[in-house]
Image: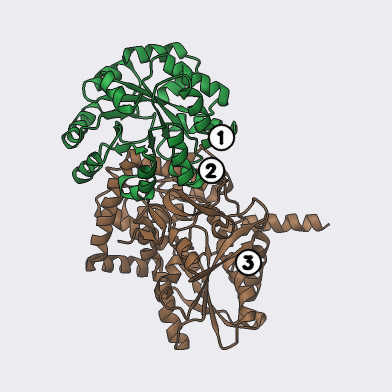
Chain colours: A brown, B green
């Protein structure tokens, strides 16, 4: 299995985790060559997740922006409302194959936590979700959702009490419970083989998109845009297109309050190479290699690193990574809600924000696919707060 | 004195650890001197890191205090220089990979050589990733202390042991520093496997707290590391208890 992408990736983990990640690698390789596993996964994706989801032609947005034909890959229509379930379900099935009755996961906004809790409820696995105390306070409803689904939410009080600290604690807990516990990492990050596993289970996004676009347009799309935090929806969307250079690929990082401020989450546009959570990749860090806290209005992009393959795709120039600020994402969310009647997740709204810049520069005969990685219901309250605040400010 | 002479001279050397800069530079230097004066045979100088995934609360918090006081790798070298001017006890640096990577490998290992620091322990740089620093270790004649866990498989254990130098660090718990009780029987079994593959001394660490622990480990390994427990005792002002434990270890 691939463990490095150029100089990125690898297995920078403590010795005690080496055997479990190697066991996971063996279990994963056995699963993906087993037709019965594919049948089971396919069955759940169809009848439980609701795949395939549509590739929607966004006619109003297309007209309004006056350039490329815009299509939306509708991961927001999946069960639990985002792409996270694709990976959570796949890895939960792997945990079952390994005979591990317990599952742990980290979560920031709670989306991966909810997806993992859901998969564990479905498959009868015990589930513990590690979540920073700060994030728990900000995302109370998702904490309750996870508990309703039968999971235990472990409050992480160490460090800065956010996603990176929850990941640290999950890794530590895993080190102490490796015999009966599988760790479902939620993004395309972590030590090998995690980035490959997450890419594998998320590549259904790109595979469906390719087929659907072929059926509608008789050819490949000209450009694809996805938001990137850790980068799981993006790498899944890119997967079948990476070797097809005629398809332009864009990744949109969260620029928060702006790249010229410390308040952002843009690891590639505003970070440097480093090693965190088992992988070598672009990181937000200070000169001494101390990892910084990331910031974005969208909690799902609020991670100081990025999947190692993205770092590689950036260096090789195959994917163009661009920033979008909080303001741009909120404007994009409102634009899409009003023109298409779809409220995107704040994460996905970053991709929409760049589409609003790119589409008008493209020809009317060209097509542009946006990966709509999740729905915005979870963000409605914070958008309301922000917009009413802006309103008060202007008075 | 070299690491090798420590194992030749002492039946059961005791190694301790301190987080450089915990309490500020002056206080942590004083603590280092206290440990050596109390009889510690080798000292690990810890580099603080924001995300120490192999460490429990005690070392994590010590690292946060050290970072607040402005500790960095240069402070570690400064302390090494100060200690080397007074003592012969060998020093080892313990650091996660990222601070070293950001400092620059060439700069870091040349500084190690310059300060006569013989070895480095990097808990998140396993055998499979040794290529990361291998050429620098050779160039500057610095050792990387290998780590073995209780679940390390037979083939990997053999490869790790055969390539080891200085000492082999055997992690005595299934988990992280300063939290669980050490698994003495399992440690004994793994120590035997390591010894079958190498002459490098085997040192156990993680979770060692009491004089009973120390005596039990003396029977199965060549040396022990006490880190978190001493940091905890120092926090509580119990320096006498530290001194007493070091004495038991002799």
Q: Nearer the viewer, mark 2 or mark 3?
A: 2
Give the left or right position of residue A71, taking residue B162 as reference.
Answer: right
Q: Gap in Å between the C-alphas at discs 2 and 3? A: 34 Å
Circle 3 SS class? helix
Between discs 2 and 3, the one toward the N terminus: 2
Whether discs 2 and 1 lie on one chain: the answer is no
Seen at 50% across and 27% down, the residue is B81
Q: Position of residue B31 (x, y in %)?
A: 49, 20
Q: In this rendering, is residue A75 above or below B13?
A: below
Disc 3 chain ID? A
Q: Are marks 2 and 3 on the same chain?
A: yes
| A4 shown above or below B76 | below
Dot 2: chain letter: A
Q: Position of residue A235 (x, y in %)?
A: 44, 66
Task: Give the residue pinned by disc 2.
Answer: A290
Q: Would you name the residue on which mark 1 appears?
A: B67
For image coordinates 42% across by 67% down, the residue present is A236
Q: Is residue B125 visible?
A: no
Judge by depth and name the residue closer to the eye, A293 or A133.
Answer: A293
Asked whether B35 or A80 is in front, the reply is B35
Q: Residue at x 54, y 54 (%)?
A: A272
Is residue B196 at all visible to an observer of this figure?
A: yes
Image disc number at residue A31: none
Query: Dots 2 and 1: beta carbons under 8 Å?
Result: yes
Q: Which residue is mark 3?
A: A333
**Secondary element at image label 2:** loop
Q: Is residue B204 left or right of residue A135?
A: left
| Residue B64 point in image, percent of width and height | 54, 34
Quadrant occupied by the N terminus of chain A: bottom left
Q: Chain of mark 1?
A: B
């Amino acid at each position: 299995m691939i463990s490095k992408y150029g100089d990125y990736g690898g297995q920078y983990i403590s010795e005690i985790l080496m055997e479990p990640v190697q066991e996971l690698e063996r279990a994963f390789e056995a699963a993906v060559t087993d037709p019965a596993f594919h049948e089971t996964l396919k069955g759940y994706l169809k009848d439980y997740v609701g795949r395939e989801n549509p590739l929607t032609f966004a006619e109003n947005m297309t007209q309004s922006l006056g350039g490329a034909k815009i299509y939306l890959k509708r991961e927001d229509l999946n069960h639990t409302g985002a792409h996270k379930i694709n990976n959570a379900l796949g890895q939960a099935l792997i945990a079952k194959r390994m005979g591990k009755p317990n599952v742990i996961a980290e979560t920031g906004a709670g989306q991966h936590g909810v997806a993992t809790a859901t998969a564990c409820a479905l498959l009868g696995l015990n589930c513990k979700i590690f979540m920073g105390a700060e994030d728990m306070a900000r995302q109370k409803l998702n904490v309750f959702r996870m508990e309703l689904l039968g999971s235990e939410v472990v409050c992480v009080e160490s460090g800065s009490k956010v996603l990176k600290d929850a990941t640290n604690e999950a890794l530590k807990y895993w080190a102490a419970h490796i015999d009966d516990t599988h760790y479902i990492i939620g993004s395309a990050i972590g030590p090998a083989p995690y980035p490959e596993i997450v890419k594998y289970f998320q590549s259904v996004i790109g595979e469906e998109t390719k087929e659907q676009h072929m059926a509608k347009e008789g050819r490949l799309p000209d450009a694809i845009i996805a938001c990137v935090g850790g980068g799981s929806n993006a790498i899944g969307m890119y997967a079948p297109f990476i070797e097809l250079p005629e398809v332009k690929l864009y990744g949109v990082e969260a620029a928060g309050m702006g790249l010229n401020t410390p308040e952002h989450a843009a690891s590639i546009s505003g970070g440097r190479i480093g090693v965190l959570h088992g992988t070598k990749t672009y990181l937000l860090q200070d000169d001494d290699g101390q990892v910084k806290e990331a910031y974005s209005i969208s909690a799902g992009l609020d991670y100081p690193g990025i999947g190692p393959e993205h770092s590689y795709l950036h260096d090789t120039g195959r994917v163009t990574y661009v920033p979008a600020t909080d303001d741009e994402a909120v404007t994009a969310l409102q634009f899409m809600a009003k023109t298409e009647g779809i409220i995107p997740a704040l994460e996905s709204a970053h991709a929409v924000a760049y589409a609003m810049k790119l589409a008008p520069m493209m020809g009317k005969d060209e097509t542009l696919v946006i990966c709509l990685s999740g729905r915005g219901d979870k963000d409605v309250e914070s958008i309301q707060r922000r917009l009413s605040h802006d309103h008060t400010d202007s008075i | 004195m070299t690491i090798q002479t420590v194992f030749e001279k002492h039946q059961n050397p005791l190694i301790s650890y301190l987080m450089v800069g915990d309490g500020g530079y002056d206080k942590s230097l004083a603590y280092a001197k206290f440990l050596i004066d109390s009889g510690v045979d080798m000292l690990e100088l810890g580099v603080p890191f924001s995300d120490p995934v192999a460490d429990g609360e005690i070392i994590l918090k010590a690292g946060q205090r050290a970072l607040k006081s402005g500790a960095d790798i240069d402070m570690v070298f400064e302390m090494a220089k100060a200690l080397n001017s007074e003592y012969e006890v060998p020093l080892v640096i313990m650091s996660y990979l990222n601070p070293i990577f950001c400092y620059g490998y060439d700069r870091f290992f040349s500084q190690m050589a310059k300060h006569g620091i013989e070895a480095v322990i990097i808990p998140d740089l396993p055998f499979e990733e040794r290529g990361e620093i291998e050429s620098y270790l050779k160039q500057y004649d610095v050792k990387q202390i290998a780590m073995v866990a209780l679940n390390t498989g037979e083939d990997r254990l053999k490869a790790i042991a055969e390539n080891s130098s200085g000492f082999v660090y055997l992690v005595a718990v299934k988990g992280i520093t300063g939290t669980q009780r050490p698994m003495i029987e399992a440690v004994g079994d793994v120590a035997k496997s390591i010894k079958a593959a190498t002459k490098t001394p085997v040192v156990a660490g993680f979770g060692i707290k009491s004089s009973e622990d120390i005596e039990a480990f003396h029977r199965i390994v060549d040396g022990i590391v006490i880190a978190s427990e001493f940091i905890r005792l120092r926090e509580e002002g119990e320096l006498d208890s530290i001194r007493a434990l070091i004495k038991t270890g002799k």
